[in-house]
Image: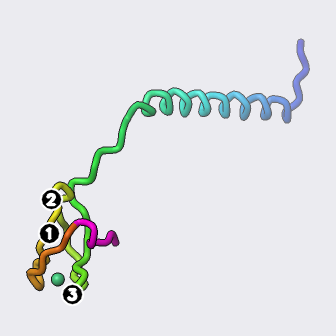
Amino acid sequence: MIRVSMPTILLLYLGIMLFFLFFIWLTSHLKGGKKKDLPPLLKFISCEYCHHPFLVKPEHPIHQCPQCSCLLKEENSSDI
Ligand SMILES: [Zn+2]
């Protein structure tokens, strides 16, 4: 009969569990690697005149501030 000490059994158990978790992470990483980030539906900008923050659709180049009704270009808007 093979004599195995308790620390050896514990080390083998932890090594097998660590390898099993690494294998699960590796397979999920390889499957999810082909996903691409979707563009955001709404963008959060603030008015440069009254500093009122509001949400806009990023496909429109010009936005109107809901508080002061000023028109803002995409280049002048800033992300928060
Ligand atoms: Zn404004």
Q: Is mark 2 within 8 Å of ligand 1?
A: no
Taking the spot 25% from the left edge, 76% from the top edge, the residue there is 46
Q: Main secondary structure of the magenta part?
A: loop
Asked if marks 1 and 2 touch (Cβ < 8 Å), the reply is: yes
The three-letter code of the residue at mark 1 reads His
The three-letter code of the residue at mark 3 reads Cys
Q: Badge 1 local density, few (<14 within 10 Å), some, or many (20+)?
A: many
* Mark nearer the N terminus (2 vs 3): 3
Gap between marks 2 and 3 measured at Cα: 21 Å
Tell whether 78 sits left or right of 61: right
Q: Is mark 3 within 8 Å of ligand 1?
A: yes
Residue furthest to the bottom: 50
Gap between marks 1 and 2 measured at Cα: 7 Å
* Mark nearer the N terminus (1 vs 3): 3
Tell whether 14 sits left or right of 62: right
SS of the residue at dot 1? Answer: strand
| Whether residue 29 is situated above or below residue 71 in the rendered picture | above
Boundaries of the magenta span? 74-80
Instruction: Give residue 63's mark.
Output: 1
Instruction: Give residue 60's mark.
Output: 2
The residue that mark 3 highlights is 50
